[in-house]
Amino acid sequence: MVGYLENAKQLWNFHCVYDDLTPSDVIVGLGSYDLRVASRCADLFKQGLGKRIVFSGASGNWTGELYSTTEAEAFQQHAKKMGVPEDAMLLEPMATNIGENMRFCARIVPEAASAIIVTKPQTQLRALATAKAQWKGTSVSVTAPEIGFQDQPLPHHDERAMICEMVGDFARMEDYARKGFQADVDIPPETRAAFSALVTAGYIDHLPKSS
């Protein structure tokens, strides 16, 4: 019998993308509860893979009590501590979902022909599919901190929360594609089965209210 961990790792592998990266006009860090995303942005900047960084994100359900600022500002402060010059960073502090991340960043850097989206490992596929639908005309690749499944949970976002997050993101994918919020994504049967098993096992905290 397949256990919850095997099913969770099946979803993890589905969500993780890690594109091959080439120098781009801008690096976009999607705000979240995970400052390791800001660290990854800083590392990419230092490697010369982007001329500027845009940090995007308001304050959400998972970060309202975690940061004293918006997610974008918290990420900027973290990257500054890592040596990224302040004048190389732009802020987008209004976005409350990935679609807004893409649309609002596109307005801030309309001249960008290419962008590297940096997010949590388990959010990569959704971010890439959203960018394809809502940041058209810009060549987009996606990456994340190079962290494995077992090392991704944090004290304030534990294993259960991470699995529920992946289940919820999976549940939104086909509906969001139908609504034009993101591009279509091929879903292997084994991944769909893993999702169903995790729902049955009770990992439902992040499911859309209609599910």
Image (cartoon, helix red, strand yellow):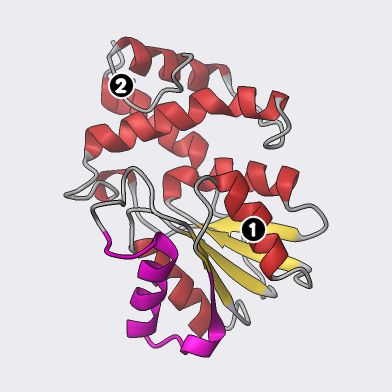
Q: Position of residue 23 (x, y in %)?
A: 67, 75
Q: Position of residue 161 (x, y in %)?
A: 27, 35
Residue plotted at (48% across, 32% down): 169
Magenta residue check for 146: no
Tell me the crowding category of disc 1: few under 14, some 14 to 19, or many 20 or more residues within 10 angstroms, Cα based.
many
* Residue 192 seen by the camera: yes
Q: Position of residue 136 (x, y in %)?
A: 79, 52
**Residue 92, picture quadrant:** bottom right
Residue plotted at (27% across, 18% down): 3
Callout 2 amino acid = Tyr
Question: Is 82 located above or below residue 160 in the figure?
Answer: below
User: Outermost residue toward the right?
Assistant: 137
* Along the viewing direction, whichever of 91 and 28 lies nearer the viewer: 91
Q: Is residue 2 left or right of residue 144?
A: left
**Residue that carries the numbered disc 1 in the rendered image:** 104
Callout 1 amino acid = Phe
Question: Is 127 located above or below residue 50 in the figure?
Answer: above
Q: CA distance from mark 1 to mark 2?
A: 32 Å
**Residue that carries the numbered disc 2 in the rendered image:** 203
Q: Position of residue 171 (x, y in %)?
A: 50, 23
> At numbered mark 1, what does the secondary structure look like: helix, strand or loop?
helix
* Along the viewing direction, whichever of 60 and 172 lies nearer the viewer: 60
Q: Provide the residue span drawn in magenta.
A: 67-91
